[in-house]
Amino acid sequence: MPVMTVPTYPAARLVADAVQGHFARHITSARGRGGGELETPPTLAIAAIIDAAFWASLRREEGRAPRISLAFLPPENAKHAVTFAGRLPLLPAVLAKVGPAVERPGIHLGVWRNGDEFFVWGTTREVPAFCLVVEVVTSGLIVVKHRSEPFGKFVNVAVLEGDQIKIVDEGVGRVVPDCPAVVTSLAGAKDRTSGSGLTTVMIQLAASMRQHGRGGALLVVPSGSNDWRESIVSPIQYAVEPPFSELAVLSCSDKADPDDLGRAVDAIAGLTAVDGATIITDRYDLLAFGAKIARKRGSTPVEFVNVTEPVEGSSPVRAAPAQFGGTRHLSAAQFVHDQRDATVLVASQDGRFTIFKWSPHEQFVHAHRVDALLL
């Protein structure tokens, strides 16, 4: 039976209007381009689904926290749908109970409404662009997202953790000087399926690095230059000769099998779990892993970097790398300071993720905190 849902998780009510505005803008724009098949989700639905997901995340089923993805759409708009004979109420206890059946990536519980009442109608493996998706990442950590059009990756809209709310700033590229394309793409400022395929691969590398949970650093250096060696301790214990080019070849092919590309990405990202830094070119040729970063001869030590996070209300700060990370962050900042055409991706064991890039406009090393975009 469907039930009336009155949200009791305060953050669900606080974030609902901002999330509704985000979906309204994108769905209206999609209709203007002749696309889009969904109605803008009402604030009551947004709050109700977030509320149920949050309280479900605090429950345990056979000692394990649930991992659930909820998609707000009617069954007739879903593809590869499994429809339950009877509707299930949108209640935390129900979500926690059915959670083990849908915890694998790519499976969503379908949620729809009857007036102000909400119910779970079944499961789906595919959702249309700009469909509201609410995901339970872990206990107390909820992500609101949608798929970009037409078949792009998911874009995070908001992240809720306890009483902390982060709303992704799509306009980060307009307010942060020299913002890297990978950051603006992650923030949803442009469709991830358009533009540079190399940017898409960079996003996949970042996500895979974060997923292995061991922390790591990936140095992306210009092709055809050996200047980066001035900032690396020699000899490199795990140098690759000749450079391994599987990911480079796949990333440039329009006919590459996505599964092959994913395995190649995971292979490179997996090397970052080894102590030291993994080094690839900006065309994704693997040069080395386990490399030790050293300050370039004659260079000054990096004491401070500019730090931004692409969420609304966040203000830039100037901080020492040790204030928001450890030796990896300090080494990454030094490498970018000395090798200004390079980009460094740093994953922390606690899930934080930072992209270091030299800003010609600021004449400073800039640290872009993007954990909220990779959940």
Image (cartoon, rainbow, N blue to C red):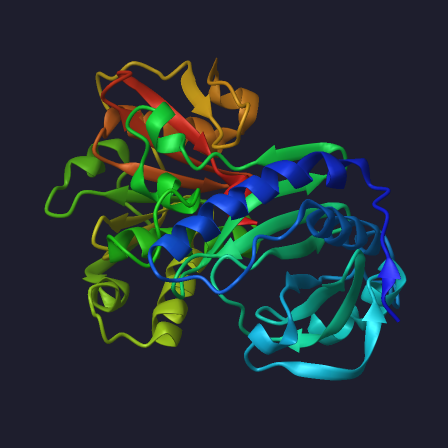
Q: Residue at x 26, y 32 (%)?
A: 231
Q: Decide which of 2, 157 is in the foreground and name it.
A: 2
Q: Residue furthest bottom?
A: 85
- The count of marks equals 0
**Residue farthest to the left, as pictured:** 224
Percent across and percent down for residue 344 are 35, 38
x%, y% of residue 86? Answer: 83, 81
Residue 20 image point, x, y percent: 60, 44
- The correct choice, above or below, for 361 with respect to 369 in the image is above
> Do we see residue 75 in this rendering?
yes
Question: Residue at (35%, 44%) from the top-left corner?
Answer: 182
The answer to whether residue 67 is left or right of residue 65 is: left
Residue 348 appears anywhere in the view: no
Q: Nearer the viewer, residue 80 or 365?
A: 80
Q: Is residue 103 above or below residue 47?
A: below
| Percent position of residue 93, x then y | 89, 62
- Which residue is depicted at the point 86% across and 47% down? 6
Q: Is residue 341 left or right of residue 119?
A: left
Quarter of the image for the N terminus: give it: bottom right
Left of 211 or right of it: where is 228? Answer: left
Image: 18 above or below 324: below
Residue drawn where x is 36% and y is 73% of the image? 258
